[in-house]
Image (cartoon, rainbow, N blue to C red):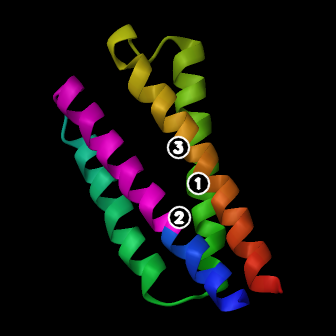
Amino acid sequence: MVLLNYKFWMGFNGFVLLFLAVNISTIGVEINSGLPFLVGLCYLIYMFVYLSKSILWKVHVLIGIGIAGTLFYLIGMLTGMITDNLSPYAWTHIVLSIILTGGSFMHLKSEKK
């Protein structure tokens, strides 16, 4: 049962990374920039690396990605760097990053059992 729990959280986090990559790419369309597409592609590449083999450092990086994404968009919204038309995407990214961070902590918890 522990292995099933561990694999569930691994798949859950990979799925959330996919949503984050799509959200970042959508932001790239809105601002007509290639940088968000590159970041989204990096999210997808990391998703495949993360799902390829279970190593503890990958979960720690996932927690860092979730925290960094949350902080970036929160600071961007507070400083006015995020425009009104990007606000829904920023909130979506914040929520998904929080979910990713929570899922990563659950992954760590399932691994330590």
Report if the CB atoms under discs 3 and 1 are less than 8 Å apart.
yes
Residue 76 picture location, percent across and down = 52, 23
Q: Is residue 90 above or below residue 2?
A: above
Q: Residue furthest right?
A: 113
Task: Identify the magenta region.
Answer: 12-32
Magenta segment main secondary structure: helix
Along the polypeptide, which appears first: circle 2 or circle 1? 2
Q: Which residue is mark 1?
A: 100
Q: Which residue is mark 2?
A: 13
Quadrant of the frame with the N terminus: bottom right
Left or right of 14 on screen, residue 31: left
Q: Is residue 65 above or below residue 98?
A: below
The foreground one among 11 and 105 is 11
Q: Is residue 82 above or below residue 91?
A: above
Q: Secondary structure at mark 2?
A: helix
Q: Secondary structure at mark 3?
A: helix
Residue 46 picture location, percent across and down = 40, 70
User: Which residue lies at the image location 49% right of the left edge and 90% below the top edge?
Assistant: 53
What amino acid type should be assigned to the residue bearing mark 1?
Leu
Report if the CB atoms under discs 2 and 1 are less than 8 Å apart.
yes
User: Which residue lies at the image location 34% right of the left edge and 51% below the top edge?
Assistant: 21
Residue 57 picture location, percent across and down = 63, 79
Distance Cα–Cα, label 3 vs label 1: 6 Å
Distance Cα–Cα, label 2 vs label 1: 6 Å
Q: Is residue 19 magenta?
A: yes
**In which quarter of the view is residue 41 placed?**
bottom left
